[in-house]
Amino acid sequence: MKPSALLLLALGLAAAPFLHADLKSPMNEAAETYVQLALALGVHDGDFVDAYYGPAEWRSAAEAAKIPLAEIQSQERALAARLAAVDLTGADEIGRLRHEYLVKQLAAMDTRIEMIGGKKFPFDEESKRLFDAVAPHNTEAHFDAVLAELAKALPGPGTLAERFQAYHQQFVIPRDKVDAVFQAAIRAARERTRRHIALPEGESFTVEYVTNKPWGGYNWYKGDYHSLIQVNVELPVFIERAVDLASHEGYPGHHVYNVLLEKNLMRGRGWLEFSVYPLFSPQSLIAEGSANYGIDVAFPGEERVAFERDVLFPLAGLDPARAADYYHVLKLTKELAFAGNEAARRYLNGEITSDQAVAWLERYTLAEPARAQQRIRFIDKYRSYVINYNLGQQLVGDYIEGRAGGDADRRWEAFKDLISSPRLPSGLR
């Protein structure tokens, strides 16, 4: 299986400049073409390539060549057909996972090309094609029952949303204390992670505080075991976001996930496909799901409450005596996590308007108007990507707990194994 001569010619590249000759194989050659196709598509879709740390000349060549979308799709489909013919006889589990990974990543690429060309898919079909999963459907009655339970914890005048927002505002980190609180959360998350996962020397990330973004935080992985993490401080930052973002974006979340893929698969095995991270692909559900579930792996249950009470609340100038009650309320609100999916599904399917979607989010996620509008901007930009956070967390959690059996050390081991592998969403069930 040779990389497409037409693609390499268009990019002005020779075949396999990155891999040593003894690493050449049909799968490695397919991986090279896959990476070059992803970079070519990234020229048309600025959000598609979330991270790349392969040969710099490949990215430069893709930007210079500007291969038409139709040609990229033709090359992608030809590669998918060649992969389908690969003989997997004698392949071990990780070899089979690698093959499935490339097949499904290419299928998602095909869908994204269709979408860039103007084709629209129903929400569930889109998420299945892009992310290899479909989120469950929930009715208003389901969320109303959750709201009724939450109302018991927040009695008083006004609507439940008004009562929750008034309560929540009491736990905002003052702007001049955000960095100190966040850095303390990072140190703790890193120390807890390093007890269980060996990270390469020199791994690190830089933190920036930004505004005017549709997301709360973002990890930009740069390769060589380094990330840039941006935290959006346009809206008030609540105390729970410190641990959430430190773990989700950093340890043991996105930063560790990317570090381990680079260390174990790209460098360790010479699997070049892991030098590129296409955002609109099944890989994202594993990335987001493990990052969200990793929060609870690093800070399980009462350990998190104790850490925040003893360390973060005082740093933020908040009353530590209120930590336990606060996290009881937040635990109830987590039952509303899938309400955001329902808003996105109905909105993107044309069943409700953006204003109605904002109203849904205000009612069923208890978001204040500015935060609900920010969520709609995220949905407009990233569409069915929203399922990766909550459904991803659920699938990853069920998969890991099924292997850990409640044992903390086995939980860390199963978590590390998952984020060091090419396993994808349908492989979690």
Image: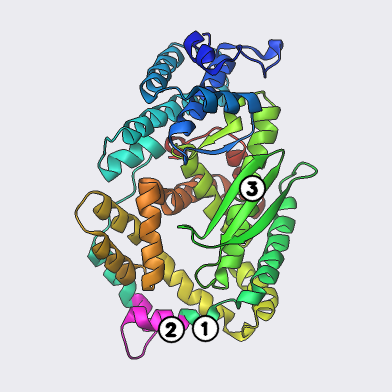
| Lower position in the chain sequence, tag 3 or tag 2 | 2
Residues in magenta? 149-167
Mark 1 surroundings: few (<14), some (14-19) or many (≥20) residues within 10 A = few
Q: Quadrant of residue 314?
A: bottom right
User: Which of these two is toward me, 263 or 213?
Assistant: 213
Marks 1/3: CA–CA distance: 31 Å
Question: Is 264 situated above or below 177?
Answer: above
Q: Residue at x 60, y 44 (%)?
A: 414
Three-letter code, disc 2: Ala
Predominant SS of the magenta segment: helix
Whether 150 is among the magenta residues is: yes
| Residue 166 image label | 2
Gap in angstroms between the C-alphas marked 3 and 2: 34 Å
Q: Is residue 313 magenta?
A: no
Task: Name the residue furthest bottom.
Answer: 157
Whether residues under marks 2 and 1 lie with C-beta atoms below 8 angstroms apart, the answer is yes
Label 2: how many Cα within 10 Å (few below 14, some 14–19, many 20+): few
Q: Quadrant of residue 267?
A: top right
Q: Secondary structure at mark 1?
A: helix
Residue drawn at point x = 33 percent, y = 61 percent: 339
- Image quadrant in which the C terminus is located: top left
Q: Residue furthest left?
A: 351
- Regarding residue 208, the answer to whether it shows in the image is yes
The residue singled out by tag 3 in the image is 255
Q: Is residue 413 visible?
A: no
Number of dots carrying numbers: 3
Q: Earlier in the sequence, mark 1 or mark 3?
A: 1
x, y percentage for residue 184? 71, 67
Tag 3: Cα neighbours inside 10 Å, few (<14), some, or many (≥20)? many
Nearest the viewer among 9 and 230 is 9
- Marking on residue 170: 1
Q: Nearer the viewer, residue 7 or 305?
A: 7
